[in-house]
């Protein structure tokens, strides 16, 4: 099927050798170092939280939420867990099995899983 307009997406993909690197890769190294430090901090904080003496459920307090609210929360928790598992399967595991590499969607999913730390 031909068109009068050129395709915005070329038929072939550029290989790693075809992509020109910038003259200085210092910004890439800086952001990679900052990202690695951030992930290390997240891992440290999570490990300290899980291994703390006071790790456990928080007391709900004097107010008892209605049963409908508890059901809504439990359904939402289950739905989000199923969605997270589906995203991991669809965007990370399947592309690795098919292509041998993670695509940009998979990288976004990995990034989203590190954003829990920013939850206020």
Image: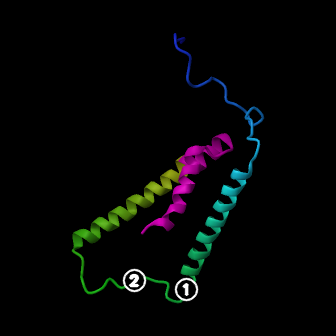
Disc 2: CA contacts within 10 A as few (<14), some (14-19) or many (>=20): few
Q: Considering the whole magenta stretch, tell me its main secondary structure.
A: helix
* Residue at 52%, 10% in the rendered image: 4
Residue 43 position within the rendered picture, expressed as x and y whole percent measured from the top left = 61, 71
Secondary element at tag 1? loop
Q: Is 4 drawn above or below residue 39 in the view shown? A: above
CA gap, disc 2 to disc 1? 14 Å
Residue 56 position within the rendered picture, expressed as x and y whole percent measured from the top left = 46, 83
* Residue at 36%, 85% in the rendered image: 59
The magenta-colored residue range is 91-120
Answer whether residue 102 is magenta in the image: yes
* Residue at 55%, 23% in the rendered image: 8
Q: Which residue is mark 1?
A: 52
Q: Which residue is mark 2?
A: 58
Secondary element at tag 2? loop
Identify the mark at residue 90; answer none if there is no mark.
none
Q: Is 17 drawn above or below residue 82 in the view shown? A: above
Disc 1: CA contacts within 10 A as few (<14), some (14-19) or many (>=20): few
The residue lying toward the viewer, choosing from 99 and 60, is 60
Answer whether residue 33 is magenta in the image: no
Q: Is 74 drawn above or below residue 88 in the view shown? A: below
Dividing the picture into quarters, in which one does residue 33 lie? bottom right
The residue lying toward the viewer, choosing from 18 and 48, is 18
- Tell whether label 1 touches label 2 (CB within 8 Å): no
């Amino acid at each position: 099927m031909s068109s009068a307009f050129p395709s915005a997406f070329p038929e072939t993909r550029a290989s790693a050798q075809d992509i020109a690197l910038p003259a200085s890769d210092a910004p890439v190294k800086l952001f990679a170092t900052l990202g690695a430090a951030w992930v290390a901090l997240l891992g440290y904080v999570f490990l300290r939280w899980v291994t703390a003496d006071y790790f456990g459920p928080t007391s709900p307090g004097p107010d008892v939420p209605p049963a409908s609210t508890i059901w809504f929360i439990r359904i939402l928790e289950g739905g989000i867990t199923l969605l997270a598992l589906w995203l991991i399967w669809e965007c990370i595991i399947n592309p690795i099995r098919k292509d041998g590499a993670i695509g940009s969607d998979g990288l976004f999913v990995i990034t989203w899983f590190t954003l829990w730390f920013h939850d206020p």
